[in-house]
Image: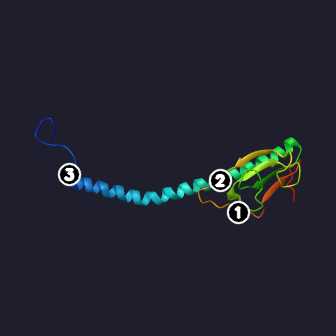
Amino acid sequence: MYHPTLHPGTQRGLTLVELLVTLGVALILLAVGTPLYSSTVENSRLTAATNALVRHVHLARSEAIKRGTAVTACASGDGATCAGSNAWELGWIVFVDGGTPNTVDGDDEILRVYPETTDGITIGASADHLRYLSDGSLDS
């Protein structure tokens, strides 16, 4: 039986072959794991953007009911006005829509601003805004 204290002249460590095999296995695991990780990160970003949009749409509806007035969520590139396009990846705003419908004007209060998605996510929709009335119904 081998015992290191009984053989003081021997050295412990890895041989070159053991080191190369270990590096080979590590490289294979890295090559397989990297694409899976990238896909997971992309899915996470998409889920986060989707959840943020849904959260803000729910906020618009609940604020319309709570305040007893219309509240609009719309695509916005500058965080202050509606963009007039259905490219929600520009960002969006939620605002109390008391004046001209679907337009930030007068005493309209901006409740939330969501910035542009900078990670290549495209959020398209058939509408450029969602306007909720005081009873929580969607204004067509």
Q: Earlier in the sequence, mark 3 or mark 2?
A: 3
Residue 16 falls left or right of residue 61? left
Q: What amino acid type should be assigned to the residue bearing mark 3?
A: Thr
19 left or right of 84?
left
Q: Which residue is mark 1?
A: 124
| Image coords of residue 136 (percent x, y) | 86, 49
Which quadrant would residue 82 be assigned to in this image? Answer: bottom right
Query: What's the residue at 30%, 54% (across, down)?
Result: 22
- Residue beneath the point at 45% across and 58% down: 34
Report the disc number at residue 15.
Answer: 3
Residue 6, quarter of the rendered image: top left
Q: Does residue 110 sit above or below 103 in this rendering?
A: above
What amino acid is at disc 1? Gly
Q: Earlier in the sequence, mark 1 or mark 3?
A: 3
Of tags 3 and 2, the one toward the viewer is 2
Q: Is residue 29 left or right of residue 81?
A: left
Amino acid type at circle 2 is: Ala
- Label 3 residue SS: loop
Q: Earlier in the sequence, mark 2 or mark 1?
A: 2
Please state the horizontal and vertical placement of residue 5, each as a whole percent of the image: 14, 35
Q: Position of residue 9 (x, y in %)?
A: 10, 40
Residue at 21%, 54% in the rendered image: 16
| Quadrant for the C terminus in the image | bottom right
Position of 56 compared to 18: left or right? right
